[in-house]
Amino acid sequence: MKGKLKLTFLGTGTSQGVPVIACKCPVCTSNDSRNKRLRSSVLIETEEINIVIDSGPDFRQQMLRENVSKLDAIIFTHEHKDHTAGTDDIRAFNYLQKKPMEVYAEKRVLNSLENEFSYVFAEKKYPGIPQMNLNEITNNSFQISGLEIIPIRVYHYKLPVFGYRIGNLAYITDTNYISEEELLKLQNLDVLVINALRLEKHISHFNLEEALQVINICKPQRSYLNHISHMMGLHAEVAEKLPENVFLAEDGLVLNLGFKK
């Protein structure tokens, strides 16, 4: 399969977003739009389908900002609220598309969704609640409407998380460890999106130095850093110091790619 793939960064911020509530640091008070970051998520569009990876607290705002009128599936990386909290807002797509939303995640994450959105799965359902079909995935490739998606097992401290590879694009967030075996799945990439929380080391996220080490191992043609906190620094200042073909992602940034199968 060959075709076009479009990736839109819906959000590139950490769990609190940027600016952080009540913070008066230079990043949070900046007038540069590149320093304003919603919670991390991406929209992936092909000629046939539209997919979102993670629907966090800003999901509604992100869908409105990008004027998304069709959504075929949501894939989850893990169950933390900054990646799942906006899922109730799939109701609009349920209504427009006259069908449940297809949701893909590993079993533990599906169990968390069933708990957090228990009213969706109650025996006696309230009118107008979200509708979703839960699809369990493992660390094996799967398809959505013929599009192959390859999970990448990474670890968020001790929590297993999935990144995903689609064609020559890979998207990874919320990790501070990737095994050598899983790194093999990240070879020959056109684009690698990977988290880089801040400059200082963190217990559950790559910092900038660690993310650059992974990039150096995988050697993608281009890399974009995401899940960025206000502690990374001002976009303009950090961007000037990055290696060639490594960029800070920003909300609303669009990448137009080809993909192959």
Image (cartoon, rainbow, N blue to C red):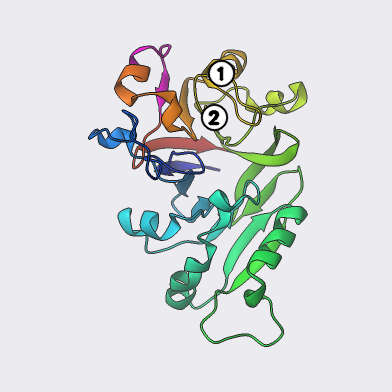
- Bin the neighbour count of mark 1 within 10 Å (Cα to Cα): few under 14, some 14-19, many 20 and up: many
| Vertical position of residue 117 compared to residue 181: above or below | below
| Vertical position of residue 135 compared to residue 219: above or below | below
Viewer-proximal residue among 229 and 43: 229
Residue at the (55%, 25%) spot, across then down: 189
Residue 261 is left or right of residue 248, and the answer is right
Viewer-proximal residue among 111 and 75: 111
Number of numbered discs present?
Answer: 2
**Amino acid type, mark 2:** Ile
Residue 45 is left or right of residue 179, and the answer is left
Distance (Cα) linking label 1 and label 2: 8 Å
Identify the secondary structure beneath mark 1. helix
Task: From the image, tell me which residue sits under label 1.
Answer: 215
Q: Position of residue 51 (x, y in %)?
A: 51, 53
Quadrant holding the N terminus: top right
Q: Position of residue 48 (x, y in %)?
A: 47, 56
Q: Magenta stretch?
A: 240-248
Residue 178: image quadrant is: top right
Task: From the image, tell me which residue sits under label 2.
Answer: 194
Q: Position of residue 222 (x, y in %)?
A: 46, 22
Residue at the (46%, 42%) spot, across then down: 3
Residue 188: image quadrant is: top right
